[in-house]
Image (cartoon, grey):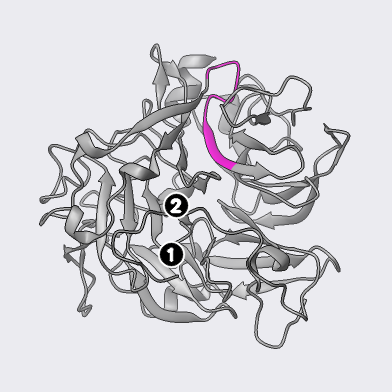
Amino acid sequence: MPQRPKTAACLALCGVLAIACSSTTPGAKPAPPSSTSALSHPTQRGYFVYWDQNEEEDYQAASSGQQGQLIPPWDPNGQLCLAPDGSGKFSVGYNPTLPSQHNPGSLKPPKQPPVGEALYDQHGQFTGHTSFVPGPFSMSAQTVGGDIPPDSNSPSHAFNNNGTFVGCAFDGRGDLFATDLGTAQGQFPAPDDGRLIEWFGPQLTSYCILYGPTSGGVGPHHVTGTGGLRQPSELAFDANGDLLLPEAGATQNGLPGGRVLRFDHTAFPQGPADCGADGVYPRDKIRTSTFFQGSLSLLPFPLAIARDPTCSCWAIDSVFGDPAVAFFDDQGHQLPAHGVIHGQTIAQLGKDPAGYNPFGLAVAPDGTVYFVDIHIACQNNSLGNCGPVSKGGRVMKVTFTAGQPGVPVPIATGIDFPTSVTVCVPTLHQYCPLPSGITG
């Protein structure tokens, strides 16, 4: 599969297709984000949609249709996660922008360490704060290192193939959770070196590896080793405070069978002291269950999950398969009366230029679904040689009437390797990020 120089969008498709032709109070438990306590910002109306592409972050104001750039090209590469304090601050994953990506971000000083989560203010300005797992690996002249090593197989030893933070979410007390998809670069089955990591608020510097490799790999955290998650992706918290995590690369009977895991928040550490000197949470303390199990016939490669307030249900997408998006109750059962968003089967993948391949997913207050189409194409009609099309990505919008979807329509086209989409509602979040001088 043609490789993007960022792992977040390099999907484990090739083998699949080939076989298938706020502050922290000590002792406080995480609480779900509040949906009623925040007041709307007086100058913001409606809701706002955000998406990343080619190391920048863009937005659209739903009420006016106005679009713009929130973050100029400089490393954003994953899910945008709003802090729960109503300030408009947010976090997004990053790793170095490479010269081959042909944008001005490659001319800026790389953030330290090379891979992590970056915190931005309400106007999309980098605060200088990064959340990461400390280690010995840094770039030339950098003073801060992380535990993710450079890629020894890359001529430039780039920091783009051994770890990428793609999914993130804040819990109600302000702790930040993120998924590192590890080395997933097109293999099937996906390698089991993905991780789930928590940073404790309000400083967001102390960390705990909640779930990750347990043997092999590099260093005491077994980075690039085995025993972790298979291509974990974008995150969401449910009303109980449990964390929902799509594990796209999981298998079922040797075939694609991604799933969504539910992590019991009552089993999470209360602070760094619970994590141990090595920063790894004991595996036997974590409690998980399968919220949804995919199969070849239903969402085989789930990458995102989002709450739909109009049906009090969950939308889950898959990068390939028909349906592309389906809806589930709080127990993970599909809603038979709710319409699905149809997609491409494996046999159709890459053959229809108008087709779409969902990655990130978000739902607006009125039930409108937004998803990013990373847009897979196959070379020489070979299903074993597929990958994202350069400047072929789109942000798609789907409206619903009485639970049935309309035709997906693009609100942004010609974008490079989009991975995530986020909806911010001023009445829920208090302030939605906007460039300085823009009121929405």
Picture coordinates of residue 202, whole percent (x, y): 37, 72
Q: Which residues are magenta?
A: 295-305
Residue 25 visible (yes or no)? yes
The residue where tag 2 is placed is 166
In this rendering, position of residue 369 left or right of residue 184: right
Q: Quadrant of residue 273?
A: bottom left
In this rendering, position of residue 140 left or right of residue 390: left
Quarter of the image where the C terminus is located: bottom right
Q: Is residue 299 magenta?
A: yes
Q: Is residue 261 magenta?
A: no
The residue where tag 1 is placed is 174
Quick check: 312 above or below 250? below
Separation of disc 1 and disc 2 at Cα? Answer: 19 Å
Picture coordinates of residue 280, whole percent (x, y): 18, 49
Please name whichever residue, 343 or 278, is drawn nearer the observer in this view of the structure. Answer: 278
Q: Main secondary structure of the magenta part?
A: loop
The three-letter code of the residue at mark 1 reads: Gly
